[in-house]
Image (cartoon, grey):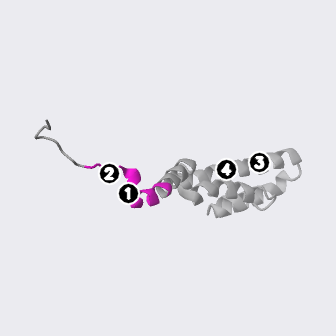
Amino acid sequence: MESPHRDDTTFQTPDDDKGFLQWRPVRLFREIWREITFGVGAWGTLRPLITALLASIPFLFLGQHFNRQHRKGFDWMLLQIPLALTIVLWIGLWLYSIFDAWRAATQLSASD
């Protein structure tokens, strides 16, 4: 004997829905991208790297100019003239400028 409360309802799983299957890879990619870039996007991730590469060009301090710290870049360019006489101090200034440009770009990306 059948019970009077029998329900012939069919359940549809999310896998059966074609629209859900089309969007799931996009959501997965978006979440992976957010984890890789720490939520700051592609430019926020690449900006410190590009700035450090520009700052590694000797004598020009382009990393500081790229970060719109023109005054600092110009001051360091003038400071390198007397430091060029002592090559060790000049190399120290050059290496510090690379680190400073990377740090400033990271702070700019984090504040945006």
Quadrant housing residue 79: bottom right
Question: Residue 14: where, in percent of width, then height?
Answer: 37, 51
**Secondary structure type for disc 2:** loop
Question: Residue beneath label 3, please?
Answer: 95
Estimate the spatial distance between the alpha carbons at disc 2 and disc 1, rounded to whole Å: 8 Å
Estimate the spatial distance between the alpha carbons at disc 4 and disc 3, rounded to whole Å: 9 Å
Which residue appears at 49% of the width and 58% of the height?
26
At label 3, which amino acid type do we have?
Leu
Q: Residues within 10 Å of mark 3 (few under 14, many from 20)?
A: some
Numbered badge on residue 17? 1
Q: Confirm or deny contact between disc 3 and disc 1 (CB under 8 A).
A: no
At label 2, which amino acid type do we have?
Gln
Question: Residue beneath label 4, please?
Answer: 100
| Magenta highlight range | 10-25
Nearest-to-viewer mark from 1 and 4: 1
**Magenta-drawn stretch, dominant element (helix, strand or loop):** helix
Q: Confirm or deny contact between disc 2 and disc 1 (CB under 8 A).
A: yes
Numbered badge on residue 12? 2
At label 1, which amino acid type do we have?
Asp
